[in-house]
Amino acid sequence: MSAYTAIRSFRFRSIDGPALLAGLIIAVPVVVTLLAGVLNGGGEAWSHIRDTLLTGYTTGTLGTLALTALMTLAVAVPAAWLVTMYQFPGRGLFEWLLILPLAAPGYVLAYAYADLMGLMGPFQVAIRETTGWTARDYWFPDMRSLPGLAFVLTCALYPYVYLTARAAFVSQSVCALEAARSLGASSARRFWQVALPAARPAIAAGLALTLMEAAADYGAAEYLGVPTLTFGIVRAWQSFGEPAAAARLALVLVVIVIALILTERHTRGRAGSQQSSTRWRNVSRTRLPRWAGLGAMAACALLFLATFVLPMSRLIWLVMESQGQIAPIGRALVNTLILAGSGAALAFVLAMVIALTARQSGLIAGFARLMASTGYAIPGAVLALGALLVMGYLGITLTGAGAIIALAWVYASRFTTSGAEPMVAALGRAPASMGYAAESLGASPLRRAVSVDLPVALSGAMAGALILFVESLKELPATLMLRPFNWDTLSVRANAYATDERLAAAALPSLLITLAGLLPVILLSWRLSHSRPGDTQ
């Protein structure tokens, strides 16, 4: 149906009111920021940033995205291919262990790796003690650099590509792979010429999500000293106190994010494969010879060691080493629970509305879903700036309740779609005949949503609520910009300690954030291993 026909046939339904409200709540911070960036001149602060800093911010962002993309593809796609298509020692364990790095925010890994790889870190100390060299006698990778930032973000975000690639390899036609094998194609050739082209849309979707998260990063970039646009947005607000200049920077960042989205959709639209009738037949994994199997196991173990075990072990060691000197974080923990709980509660309500309208077509329902997806793609610093401008226009000060409302709004705008997905998945498993039966009995769209769809969606509500809470808990740039004065959260406290080079003090809140993130990641891994087609152990 064309857009013109859809507009001509539009009529406002009972379900459209909540959907429209949800879409507007999510969209306003983005729209206000973009309008401010276009309409406001930015003043002297913008002139200074444009002439002296903008080039560095932009090249830092683009360079980080390019290196992160290359590193992520280099580790995530081969790992997904190995655990999907081959049988080797520990394969079933690594299949879900490789998802765990998703629990740790990039800034947490940046703190750990900067300490591990630093001049006084264990690696360089061991080199000097073993060889008798001084620091000037050898070269060692510098984590406080653009490649270091890309490495840290790859460690934190590669599971997005790993998950989408693994799902694509599992769901593609087994017959195509078997036909290539019967024609004498080697394993490498089957991967490059059959499996990879078919999986390219899914890999592109995972990579786009990875790069959007990398573009939104603030904590890792700030700590490692790499100038990026998100770093510039927060700095323009904190140092210059000039929202208009920050909005101009946000506009540049949004253009980059939109380019990533359009590129992913172009790739997804042009690529694809035809599946046979045996699409969901069990994947027949090839048992690797002994030494090849040990090599595959070593590769997966090395990836898990580098991306999760090493940084987490370092943080645990720092906590244990300085038990009596750890600063109290009780108040920060309470603040975190209040802010994350408020944001998760609002996002949960919006996510429920989005999920309940997902199965009912219509312009307003489509608008709400589009806004939820767009909000997730926009960095938290940009949304925080929009909320800041709106609160300023309304004369609401960012103290106490006003700041909590603003942060809850930003969290909801950014993460609503994350909470809606488990509910939409739960609705997708319910037979469509339930909704048709309700409609045939004269139920309005709103009554159908409340009486029929809502009980089904609630089966995915726990997962959605957990994801929303943890995502809100980890958010750093928005919290830095909008939190009430002297209202530190775990992420803010960890950032402050790390910035002051008090890594031992930063270790405990960083570990608590990661521990909270493990819960939804383990839940996600369990659901994948029990629900995907074609699984064999």
Image: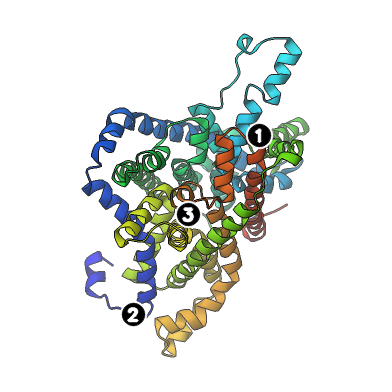
The circle drawn on residue 13 is: 2
Q: Residues within 10 Å of mark 2 (few under 14, many from 20)?
A: few
* Apparent side of residue 390 relative to residue 469 in the rendered image (left or right): left
Location of the N terminus (image quadrant): bottom left
Question: Does the image show residue 190?
Answer: no
Q: Residues within 10 Å of mark 1 (few under 14, many from 20)?
A: some
Mark 3 lies on a secondary structure that is loop
Q: x and y percent of residue 532 in the render?
A: 62, 58
Picture residue at 76% right of the left edge, 39% below the top: 320
Question: Does the image show residue 310?
Answer: yes
Spatial CA distance of label 1 from label 3 is 37 Å
Of label 1 and label 3, which has the lower sequence position?
Answer: 1
Q: Amino acid at mark 3?
A: Pro
451, 333: nearer the viewer: 333
Of label 1 and label 2, which has the lower sequence position?
Answer: 2
Q: Amino acid at mark 1?
A: Ala
Q: Amino acid at mark 2?
A: Arg
Mark 2 lies on a secondary structure that is loop
Picture residue at 63% right of the left edge, 35% below the top: 503
Residue wearing tag 1: 306
Picture residue at 61% right of the left edge, 67% below the top: 462
Q: Nearer the viewer, mark 1 or mark 3?
A: 3
Q: Give the quarter of the image for residue 293.
A: top right
Mark 1 lies on a secondary structure that is helix
